[in-house]
Amino acid sequence: MVEKNPILVISESATPESYQNLPLDEEIVLVPPSKALCALLGLKADLILLDCDINNDLGIRLLREIKPRFPDLPIIFITAKSSEELVIEAFRCGARDYHRKPLNLDNFGEIASNLLRVKRSVHEKRFFMSLGTRFSHGLAGSEEREDIPEYIQRAVRYMEDNLEKVIHLDTLADRANMSKYHFSRAFKSFTGMSPVRFVKYMKVQRAKSMLREADRKIGSTAAEMGFSDVGSFIRCFKAFEGITPSAYRSLQNGR
């Protein structure tokens, strides 16, 4: 049976009733910021809701104190006063997701449920590893990466499910509940690539798997990966791999 530990809410202003309307069947423990570390040392938690209200400096400081001590504990950063710089800093300091008040309780509850499910599952492997590639930007690492922000997970899942289509930045930003500019900056800060470049990267990784088939044609691969023409596919492939798709296919098949 999966062990269920409570959600810890860290807040100066929240009341015990503030998060009771979340669509979650979970125990919620509320502590002030001054007692957060003591509470974590004495209490097992599966998720932290760091509600800094308008005191963003305090929220970032707590993130910096908590994350190194509890690296596997997911933290959702909640604020009433947001900025693009704050979002990026929160993710850099280890927040898994970021929300501005007032909260959309249904959406927030779904995200919290997903984080709890992952935290409580000891066997779940991160979807990034399904690409079969580890690259030297912010996503490289162990097979289980529980520090990947939820907004990146939602966007990348959508990319993976729609690689054969033209994927628009507007759609990815909507998945992340951010503006295009805001999402692009935060995504690149974490992954080292813009969302558009990351989509191309994923298309190339999927194409590489297809090209391992000896009779696979370059044109059909380009079409299946949603490229407008073979030339753009070849240029994109070579930009990431350093060789053309034909050369890659030959190397894979010993020719």
Image: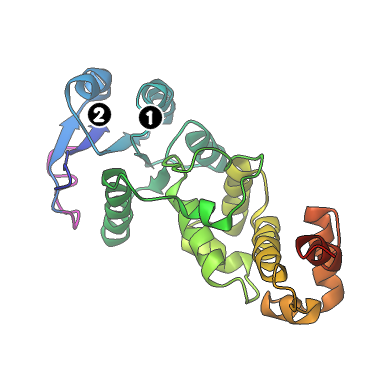
Task: Find out whether residue 43 is within the magenta segment.
Answer: no
Q: Identify residue for label 2.
A: 12
Which residue of the protein is positioned furthest toward the front in this rendering? 254
Q: Which residues are magenta?
A: 11-24
Magenta stretch mostly in which secondary structure?
loop
Q: Residue at x 86, y 58 (%)?
A: 243
Q: Residue at x 36, y 24 (%)?
A: 66
Q: Nearer the viewer, residue 10 or 246?
A: 246
Residue 30 horizontal/vertical position (percent): 17, 33
Q: Residue at x 55, y 68 (%)?
A: 171
Residue 110 horizontal/vertical position (percent): 29, 58
Q: Is residue 219 above or below residue 145?
A: below
Q: Is residue 194 above or below residue 220?
A: above
**What residue type is disc 1 on?**
Asn
Q: Secondary structure at mark 2?
A: loop
Badge 1 or badge 2: first in the primary sequence: 2
Q: Residue at x 27, y 47 (%)?
A: 116
Q: With 24 as the anchor, is 85 left or right in this view?
A: right
Dot 1 and dot 2 residues touching (CB under 8 Å): yes
Q: Secondary structure at mark 1?
A: loop
- Res 215 → quadrant: bottom right
Q: Nearer the viewer, residue 47 or 127?
A: 127
Quadrant location of the C terminus? bottom right
Residue 50 horizontal/vertical position (percent): 32, 35
Q: Is residue 164 above or below residue 33?
A: below
Q: Identify residue for label 1.
A: 55
**What residue type is disc 2 on?**
Glu
Q: Is residue 48 above or below residue 180?
A: above
Residue 122 horizontal/vertical position (percent): 30, 44
Disc 1/disc 2 C-alpha distance (Å):
9 Å
